[in-house]
Image (cartoon, helix red, strand yellow):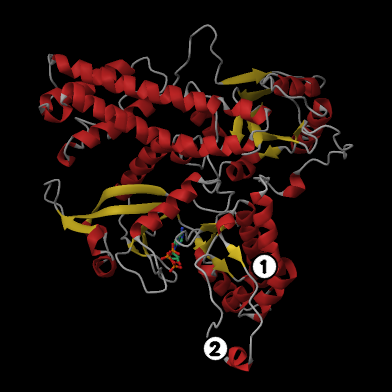
Amino acid sequence: MFPQRLDAPQAYDIAKAMMDGFNRHYRLFRTESARAKHRFETADWHGQQRAQRERIEFYDLRVKECTLRLEKEFRAGEQPMEVWHQVKLHYIGLLVNHHQPELAETFFNSVTTKILHRTHFHNDFIFVRPAVSTEYIENDEPAARPTYRSYYPSRDTMHETLTRIVDNFQLQREFEDLSRDTGFVLAAIQRRIGNVKLRANFQIQVLSSLFFRNKGAYVVGKVINGFNELPFALPILHNPQGKLVIDAALFGEDDLQMLFSFARAYFMVDMEIPSAYVQFLRSLMPRKPRAELYNALGLAKQGKTLFYRDFLYHLRHSSDKFRIAPGIKGMVMLVFDLPSFPFVFKIIKDYYPPQKDTTREQIKGKYLLVKQHDRVGRMADTLEYSEVAFPRERFDDELIAEIQKFAPSQLEISDRDGDGQQEVIIKHLYIERRMIPLNIYLQEAFDTGLQDTRAREQMERSVVEYGNAIKDLVAANIFPGDMLWKNFGITRNGKVVFYDYDEIEYLTDCNFRRVPAPRNEEDEMSGEIWYSVGPKDVFPETFGPFLLGNPAVRDVFMQHHGDLLDPAFWQAHKERIQAGHVHDVFPYDPERRFAHPPQAPATAAA
Ligand SMILES: Nc1ncnc2c1ncn2[C@@H]1O[C@H](COP(=O)(O)OP(=O)(O)OP(=O)(O)O)[C@@H](O)[C@H]1O
């Protein structure tokens, strides 16, 4: 029932306290994101990575703070439901001119669901659906920057305009030769658009904040001509002499999808109106769900909310059943999927075989490590949910039996919300993009037969990419632990991505050792490991027998990645990282990099 009067005085105060809590959160989030520019200018790479990691924690801290305040000042948990109903309505009122209303609604949900009982998790009390529109929000303050800027060059002024676009970001560090680089960009644009006639609406639109991640800053925008739009991104990096360079020009949806991939760390972007950024980015990548764009901007809680809404919507508009995911079953994770939906759901099992010496807490710790670490395009991001309810009739019986057997503590089948429908409630799960497991992908090639050119290419590409994936992880200080093919998947654009995190370690925590020479004949003949092995010892020479049983696979692997079987390779990377080196990660093919002429080495330290 809609209340005709908002007559509970404490309702406004609670709503206001909640809004203050959110505003404080966004202020801190934005300040940290805005500082990325200075860290980039001063080449503070460790600082940038630390900030990327720490910012992820901000949200939960602020939710906790706000929940405590509501309990302390208003005894929020004891308030009757009429009051809570009014709290939501007051809050909507406070959102009318807000610049981040969708984020503030999610914050409201996060706090409220900590206080109210599950039976009240519906639209009267929380924002199951958004109440306030994010369309056409503008910041009218006089000094406000617009979300994006438009430039209207002619053919003759294109070069100069491109230079001005980059100049307008006012980076406080010198370019090596900006005009030369914008010349490269111009040539790349011309290769794309050729000699087409420039229409009346010809323009370049550029988001007014740079996107920062690791050692890069990215200009993001689009070229519009008539009915055509060409998305682009320009990575700006430091060259070895410490001067700025535009490193490449990325164009089109595919390039941008790579840049904004779910397998990479989140960007730092100074945004007053995030929904306007998302809308702009969506025009560049229409197939990318909004949830993933919010994630990529570091607004992961919003990503999670939108993902869940998309998921419920998909459930309503589909009829297939959840099933055990195809592939080799995990020893620590129970994995299921819904064939019509491109994600997998992972539950930590209650017990594991003896070779998996781990605990639920340790596994959660590893997943958290991946979330906070630079994923370098090689580790899938996961969304973590608790108490997720699914309709029972959508579950395959075999899957229920599997969960009952391996993860009974995580399963409840009941009608918790009292609507007469049985639900499967999973206490804790991770959700991640579904990929084709690499073992299945390779098997497809073997089944077709390697005499077939396409099958052979599929095999070769997978093996080369697999090694590249491991090398990228190594450069990012990650030892994947379990490198079997089944723990890697192929994404839509053919990239190999790792997804089995329970044995992951920092490279710098591992000891890479050579297998010692046998002491005597007995050692040599023994099928057992006769030398002592510490918990963090790794013997790269022993990887071969597990991975390279197939001679064709072995040939390709040894040709491109034989160094992965040499302890010296791992040790050298470990030492580089320990010496403070921060690797370069290019979210594009190295061939795309502009060929900058080599510079004389710097005389002073940059
Ligand atoms: N993102 C994904 N896309 C597709 N399939 C997946 C995905 N994640 C997991 N799987 C499937 O589920 C299986 C088990 O997943 P995972 O490797 O995460 O579990 P695990 O218990 O950690 O495995 P292990 O026994 O190797 O430690 C995989 O072998 C694969 O077949």
Going from the N terminus, do you reach mark 1 or mark 2 first?
Answer: 2
Report the front residue among 61 and 568. 568
**Marks 1 and 2, how far apart in space?**
22 Å
Report the front residue among 157 and 416. 416
- Residue beneath the point at 56% across and 67% down: 537
Instruction: Look at label 2 and name its amino acid.
Output: Gly
Residue 43 drawn at (x, y percent) = 68, 33
Q: Is residue 575 above or below residue 569?
A: above
Q: Tell whether 594 sits left or right of 313.
A: right
Name of the residue lying farthest toward the front: 519
Residue annotated with mark 2: 527
Q: Quadrant of the C terminus?
A: top right
Q: Tell whether 137 sits left or right of 186.
A: left
- Residue beneath the point at 87% across and 37% down: 599
Residue 12 visible within the image: yes
Q: Which mark is residue 35?
A: none
Residue 349 drawn at (x, y percent) = 32, 64
